[in-house]
Amino acid sequence: MTVLRRVGVRVAWLLGSLLLASFLIFLATNKLPGNIAQVTLGTNAGPGEVAALEERLGLNRPFLLRYVEWLGGIVTRFDFGQSYYTGAPVSPLIAARFEVSAWVIAFGMIFAILIAIPVGSYAAVRRRHLDGIAVSALSQVGLAIPAFWAGIWLVIVFAVRLGWLPAGGYVSYWDSPLDWIRHLILPVASLAVVQASVISRYVRSSVIDVLHEDFFRTARAVGWSRIGALWRHGLRNIGISLLTVIGLQLATLLVGAIIIEQVFALPGLGSALLTAVSGRDLGIVQAIVLLLVWSVLLINFLVDITYQIVDPRLRRRAEAA
């Protein structure tokens, strides 16, 4: 099977998964027990108000017709529908909140990788020494710390005690680049520390395996230093599988960002989702959940495709099949 054909199969799976996810999310938010309009308006709403909301939202029309219109609006016009409470379009709300979440998640993962690779490699190379054991123990502790707990302590130390950074809120880059950075440091650090602990554990075990490989011993025998051989041969060999781990951790990071946005009062998708859930605004809930689920599916797809294209062993195995 050629690379192009394998990519085509993955694309077909992705499209099927996106479609199935959208249907299940729409089904789950529209088939809740009770009358959706009554739930949205509250128990004090009269029959006339309930009927008016059903008419405005189209809830009195067939389920499949509403689903097709909802999905068609998203695919063709990026229209996620409207708020069940205010009737305002959801897409502008998502667009405004997406910027905040995207920065926190992207920087969180970038810094986690930058920390995890040298820390994990150091812990592997120095695993029989006290400093290596200490680094490994610290990363083990990091695994047990929830991101929101790390965020609370970072606020106590760097915002309350030292006063170096703001405890919460958000400033747009276009308003003040310096304040934008200052407001992102603590939320990003909260996510990065926890993710770095997870990834560094994987890097450590992978590097230990590489240290026992023949190609690594050969590189050392021909004069490469340990760091040079590790950089030239070790990290290249663990890079592809590391990509898979990072892809899986990105999905975890999306969930972690929802909590972190609450801790630091960031106006991102996570805070909008929790506000919509508490206010029972199902129009916003189904839109944000769909966006998060589709993001995870797309990330996994890109990781899978990269893995298939880059790894020569998979290419040879597929071509032989």
Image (tube, helix red, strand yellow):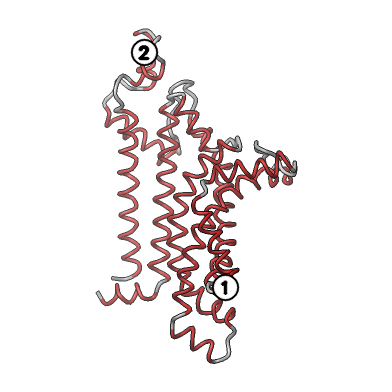
Residue 145 drawn at (x, y percent): 52, 49
The secondary element bearing badge 2 is classed as helix
Report the residue at 30% width, 33% height from top: 27
Left or right, residue 66 beside residue 108:
left
Q: Nearer the viewer, residue 272 or 52?
A: 272
Q: Amino acid at mark 2?
A: Val
Residue 50 circle label: 2
Q: Would you say 57 lies left or right of 169 here?
A: left
The label on residue 36 is none
For the N terminus, which image quadrant?
Answer: bottom left
The residue identified by callout 1 is 129
Amino acid on which disc 1 is placed: His
Vertical arrangement, residue 19 with respect to residue 122, above or below: above
Q: Position of residue 71 (x, y in %)?
A: 36, 37
Residue sitting at x 40%, y 36%: 73
Residue at the spot 58% in from the left edge and 37% down from the top edge: 263
